[in-house]
Image (tube, helix red, strand yellow):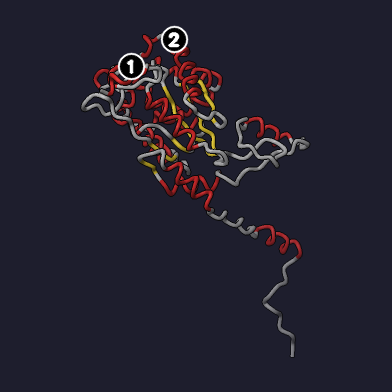
């Protein structure tokens, strides 16, 4: 009988090599969720009266939190590693076995503040407690304070005098130091300096945010400045756009602001949908301390008797509370 040809043609070595290359490597094993990570999650959650969302925060802690540290070898001359290490904040968690700075991305929390006058206990003591909770040793996190001097200027604080605004900003930082804020994992970045030095990065983000929302949506956010819609200046309409831009410019993973800033934080999450960004910032909103007068939803710097200020005398505090 004549031999029949097999329908199977043996693959050439070249084809086998190509097939091997196309085969995907197995994914790395998932990091286990430990008691320490659960402790970090629960501690951070105590900061806010609202978290959007807890599942996203959990995933963030798993991806960037405790146990993800990698340290650059002091003898390693790799340029990329050196550049990454230089860009990493100097305030990394202490590890006695490390031979260099931590070069892995850390959880980044952000809050912005206008240097606009005296500091009351809601901004002084409460913020110090919250920052210390979020940056507790080992959490692998950095808290970024955005010193919003240009924003204070747009909001007509300190009579629109930028030099006075800068002086107040420095004062507020010193008060936080005195109040016991642990600055080991904290950085202060001045808006005027950062935006000027990185204009090619900041303004394209802001323009992209601006073109994705109409004026009506932006004006709904303007209560973050304590302003009514009918009294807004053109500069104040820019305020929410720039505050939304700050989140992405600072590469913030968590917006840790007061609940009164919720609308603009939600705007940042909406922008992620519009721009098809995969990861949205987690919103962790702390509650506001009520004012001392009846019906006041929060302490106000403009009404000295509605708040207890950080430098009030004993007599002042007793009189206000009574």
- Residue 190 in the image: x percent, y percent? 50, 20
- The residue carrying pointer 2 sits among few (fewer than 14), some (14 to 19) or many (20 or more) residues within 10 Å by Cα, namely some
Mark nearer the N terminus (1 vs 2): 2
Residue displayed at 70% across by 72% down: 9
Q: Is residue 152 left or right of residue 81?
A: left
Residue 214 visible here: no
- The residue carrying pointer 1 sits among few (fewer than 14), some (14 to 19) or many (20 or more) residues within 10 Å by Cα, namely few
Determine whether the residue tagged by mark 2 lies in a helix, strand or loop. Answer: helix
- Residue 179 in the image: x percent, y percent? 47, 25
- Residue 216 in the image: x percent, y percent? 28, 29
Q: Which residue is mark 2?
A: 164
Determine whether the residue tagged by mark 1 lies in a helix, strand or loop. Answer: helix
Residue 79 visible here: yes
Tell which tag, 1 or 2, sits nearer the viewer. 1
Residue displayed at 53% across by 49% down: 36
Residue 111 is labelled as none
Q: State the CA–CA distance, disc 1 to disc 2.
A: 28 Å
Q: Choose top left, top right, bottom left or bottom right for residue 266.
A: top left
Q: Is residue 233 left or right of residue 54?
A: left
- Residue situated in front as seen by the camera: 313 or 226: 313
Q: Which residue is mark 1?
A: 315
| Image quarter hosting the C terminus | top left
């Amino acid at each position: 009988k004549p031999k029949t040809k097999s329908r199977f043609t043996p693959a050439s070595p070249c084809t086998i090599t190509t097939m091997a290359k196309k085969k995907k490597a197995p994914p790395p094993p998932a990091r286990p969720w430990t008691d320490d990570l659960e402790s970090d999650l629960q501690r951070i959650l105590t900061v806010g009266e609202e978290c959007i969302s807890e599942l996203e925060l959990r995933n963030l802690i798993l991806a960037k939190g405790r146990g993800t540290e990698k340290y650059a070898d002091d003898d390693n001359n790799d340029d990329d590693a050196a550049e990454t290490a230089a860009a990493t904040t100097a305030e990394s968690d202490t590890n006695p076995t490390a031979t260099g700075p931590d070069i892995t991305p850390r959880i980044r929390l952000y809050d912005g503040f206008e240097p606009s006058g005296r500091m009351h206990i809601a901004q002084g003591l409460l913020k110090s407690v919250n920052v210390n909770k979020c940056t507790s040793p080992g959490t692998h996190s950095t808290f970024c304070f955005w010193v919003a001097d240009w924003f204070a200027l747009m909001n007509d604080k300190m009579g629109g005098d930028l030099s006075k605004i800068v002086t107040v900003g420095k004062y507020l930082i010193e008060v936080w130091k005195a109040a016991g804020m642990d600055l080991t994992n904290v950085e202060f970045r001045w808006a005027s300096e950062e935006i000027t030095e990185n204009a090619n990065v900041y303004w394209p983000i802001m323009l992209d945010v601006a073109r994705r929302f109409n004026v009506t949506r932006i004006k709904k956010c303007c209560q973050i400045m304590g302003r009514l819609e009918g009294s807004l200046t053109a500069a104040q309409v820019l305020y929410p756009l720039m505050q939304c831009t700050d989140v992405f410019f600072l590469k913030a993973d968590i917006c840790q602001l007061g609940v009164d800033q919720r609308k603009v934080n939600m705007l940042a999450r909406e922008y992620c949908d519009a721009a098809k960004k995969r990861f949205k910032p987690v919103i962790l909103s702390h509650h506001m301390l009520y004012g001392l007068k009846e019906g006041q939803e929060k302490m106000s710097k403009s009404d000295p008797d509605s708040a207890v200020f950080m430098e009030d005398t004993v007599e002042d505090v007793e009189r206000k509370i009574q």
